[in-house]
């Protein structure tokens, strides 16, 4: 089976990870950091905003089941791509909206999806589009965070509504529909 990788940043990685773990065709989701200048950053360093890294997820998926375009359409549905360096109360460059593409095909698809989404949002899309370069896996305690801590405050009030929205809007694409 041929797989592809998508690397996306759209606010806190816990939110994105929780949604993509429920998507049919996704084989693995990992939280990490990308787009900065500091090698091997820690969560604390990324949070202080000086590393240049964004919180991202790396999604390994089967393109025979879910396309890269669908991955991006979901991405633009579950976060606000119009707010520079923030998602809700999460503020800073580490929370920016960014797509790190892994091929020229992904780059072209991302440009097309961004152009389409510009007609959906009332404000200009500020999502960065950059080549995937160095990626660093986040600490183990960040992996599968929502699944392990669904009642933790941030998870209950921020992550859970995004997961619920995904389940409602993309019901046929959820693992629950299998």
Image: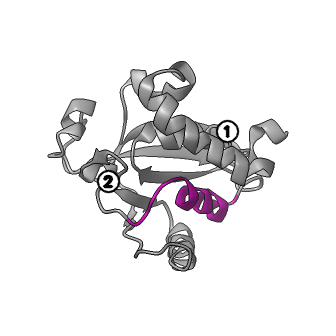
**Considering the numbered disc 2 on the image, is that residue within a helix, a strand or a loop?**
strand
Q: How is the image coloured?
A: one colour
Residue for point 25% across, 36% down: 40
The disc placed on residue 22 is: 1
117 inside magenta stretch = no
Name which of mark 2 and mark 1 comes first in the sequence. Answer: 1
80 inside magenta stretch = yes
Residue situated in front as seen by the camera: 3 or 151? 151
Location of mark 2 (residue): 86
Answer whether labels 2 and 1 touch (C-beta < 8 Å): no
Based on the displayed image, in which of its 4 quarters is residue 74 positioned? bottom right
Q: Does residue 95 appear to the left or right of 50 in the view shown?
A: right
Q: Position of residue 17 (x, y in %)?
A: 52, 39
Based on the displayed image, in which of its 4 quarters is residue 106 positioned? bottom right
Q: Is residue 118 among the parts visible in the rendering? A: yes
Q: Quadrant of the C terminus?
A: top right
Residue for point 43% across, 63% down: 81
- Mark in the foreground, 2 or 1: 2
Q: Does residue 54 appear to the left or right of 61 in the view shown?
A: left
In the image, which residues are magenta?
Answer: 67-82
**Considering the numbered disc 1 on the image, is that residue within a helix, a strand or a loop?**
loop
Q: Position of residue 47 (x, y in %)?
A: 23, 38
Q: Position of residue 52 (x, y in %)?
A: 21, 51
């Amino acid at each position: 089976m041929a797989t592809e990788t998508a690397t996306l940043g759209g606010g806190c990685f816990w939110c994105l990870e929780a949604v993509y773990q429920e998507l049919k065709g996704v084989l693995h989701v990992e939280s990490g950091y990308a787009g900065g200048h500091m090698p091997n950053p820690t969560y604390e360093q990324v949070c202080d905003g000086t590393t240049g890294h964004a919180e991202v997820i790396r999604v390994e998926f089967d393109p025979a089941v879910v396309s890269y375009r669908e991955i991006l359409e979901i991405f633009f549905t579950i976060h606000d791509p119009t707010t520079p360096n923030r998602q809700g109360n999460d503020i800073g460059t580490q929370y920016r909206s960014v797509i790190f593409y892994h091929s020229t095909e992904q780059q072209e698809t991302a440009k097309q999806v961004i152009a389409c989404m510009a007609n959906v949002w009332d404000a200009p899309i500020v999502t960065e589009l950059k080549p995937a370069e160095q990626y660093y896996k986040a600490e183990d305690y960040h992996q599968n965070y929502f699944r392990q801590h669904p009642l933790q405050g941030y998870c209950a009030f921020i992550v859970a509504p995004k997961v619920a929205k995904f389940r409602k809007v993309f019901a046929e694409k959820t693992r629950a529909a299998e």
